[in-house]
Image (cartoon, rainbow, N blue to C red):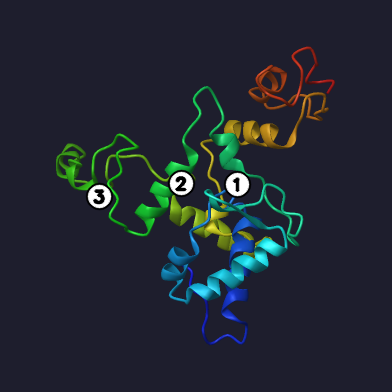
Amino acid sequence: MWKPDRNSPKPLYRQIAEHIERRIAFGELPPASALPSERKFAEQLGVNRSTVVQAYEELRASGVIESVTGSGTRVSSYQWGMALARTPNWNRYVGGGTFLPNLPLMRKIREGIRREEAYINFASGELAPELSPNEAIRQAMGNRSFQEPLGYGDPQGYVPLRAALSSFLSEYRSIQATDESVFITSGSQQSLYLIAQCLLSPGHAIAIENPSYGYSLPMFQSGSCPGNSPSRSPEAA
């Protein structure tokens, strides 16, 4: 977990404020995300509560966060004080569909498990790692190495892969990102769908090649995608 640098000439409260701003800018904390209480956040960072209070006050004054009596502190819906351009909240579009997920609860569970807190995760409906029959699977595979638990991976994608991609983007593309701001899709179709959901609105024109990727055409024509109306011809759009 990130901790402020006590050897830095920059005040601790300013480091904390900038850290929260970066997480918002990278899309790790989407609008309306709940922030820890001042006391709990101070315990996590190993600083005085007054330091976190000062950081929150600075962010609140710039319009980045807001506090509501009885609801705690949250990321503002409109960050008019942000200097950095925020990335889209991809998790919002991934979670869209027939069933509305309990995103705040799932986020809290995942973050707690990553910090190795005493959480028992009943949300994913999978075996605990210690109950996974790895030995039986290894024998069935001809004594090949098998150590992975039989469960769901991180919904944002394999963590080491996301870390490698963020490092690659920084070194070779001069794009600043973190592993938490990288999302691994299950294929190009899902990528196109998320991009269309995020960037397009009804009536927008889409320019594509002709011939083009066949699976993208019905998606752009579909009424379920906000990027185009069903009557619009993909080739002509």
The image quadrant where one finds the N terminus is bottom left
Marks 1,2: beta carbons within 8 A: no
Q: How many marks?
A: 3
Q: Which mark is residue 147?
A: 3
Residue 127 x %, y %: 24, 39
The earlier-in-sequence mark between 1 and 3 is: 1
Label 2 CA crowd tier, 10 Å (few <14, some 14–19, many 20+): few
Kind of residue sitting beneath label 3: Gln
Of label 1 and label 2, which has the lower sequence position? 1
Tag nearer the camera, 1 or 2: 1
Q: Is residue 100 left or right of residue 195?
A: left
What residue is shown with label 1? 32
Structural distance between the alpha carbons of marks 1 and 2: 13 Å
Q: Of marks 3 and 2, which one's residue comes earlier in the chain?
A: 2
Could you tell me which secondary element the residue under label 1 belongs to? loop
Residue pictured at 14% horizontal, 39% vertical: 136
Horizontally, residue 72 falls left or right of residue 221, namely left
Report the side of 137 relative to 81 (left or right): left
For residue 137, what is the image quadrant? top left
How far apart, in angstroms, are the residues tagged by discs 1 and 3?
Answer: 38 Å
Which amino acid is tagged 2?
Arg
Name the residue carrying label 2.
Answer: 107
